[in-house]
Amino acid sequence: MTTRKPVLCSAASLLLCSTIIAAAPALAQQIGTTFPQAQNIEGDLDFADRLLMPNIPATLVRLEDVADANDELFNMPVTDAAGYRVGHFRRVETKEPGDVVAVITLNDSRRTIAVLVDHVRFHPESRRIIADLTTHEFDVTPAEFPSG
């Protein structure tokens, strides 16, 4: 006599799959509200003018507007003004004279630098941080003082 195996999978697996599918819209809505409403780049023309990339994203978010930026953006790729990947975001911190800076670890030199948050924006659609600095400006930024 042969034992019959389920065609798809066990009843417990089917129940788990259906629960995940049912919860997906609620999870998507929660993830969608993690980041603030993106600002139109037209309201930040000075930043847009400093970018060298051919297709400037229409919506960018200031790092100080991202709730819990240190956790939400940790290890996010950072691109320079031309759109080339230069490093990874580490955290936002306040330096001694009261300057709010983004701490970034550079890919090539493995140095960690601090740049003023005025020089960086978060692009939620591509999940990257865009800076208005060139690769050369990143390379010559000293590690002990914020750039800007």
Image (cartoon, helix red, strand yellow):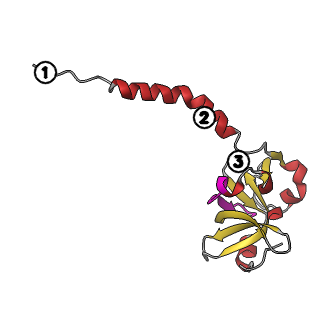
Residue 124 is marked as 3
Task: Inspect the magenta stretch and tell me whether residue 110 lies in it.
Answer: no
Position of 98 with respect to 3 (left or right) is right
Q: Is there a contact, CB below 8 Å, between mark 2 and mark 3?
A: no
SS majority, magenta: loop
Q: Is residue 20 left or right of residue 125?
A: left
Residue 33: image x %, image y %?
A: 71, 39
- How far across and how far down the image is residue 35, in percent? 72, 45
Quadrant occupied by the N terminus: top left
Point out the residue furthest to the top here: 1
According to the picture, the residue beneath numbered tag 2 turns out to be 27
* Amino acid found under the numbered disc labelled 2: Leu
Which of the two residues, 82 or 88, is positioned nearer the viewer here?
Answer: 88
Between circles 2 and 3, the one closer to the viewer is 2
The stretch in magenta equals 71-85
Look at the numbered disc 3 and give the secondary structure of its residue.
loop
Secondary structure, mark 2, is helix
Query: Does any portion of residue 85 appear in the rendered image?
Result: no
Mark number displayed over residue 2: 1
Gap in angstroms between the C-alphas marked 1 and 3:
55 Å
Please report the residue visible at 85 percent of the width from the left and 59 percent of the height from the top.
Answer: 47
Does the residue at mark 1 contact the one at mark 2 (Cβ under 8 Å)?
no
Question: Is residue 81 located in the magenta-colored stretch of the structure?
Answer: yes
The type of residue carrying mark 3 is: Pro
- In the picture shown, does residue 92 fall above or below 34? below
- Residue 140, compared with residue 22, is above or below; it is below
Q: Residue at x 79, y 56 (%)?
A: 64
Mark 2 or mark 3: name the one nearer the start of the chain. Answer: 2
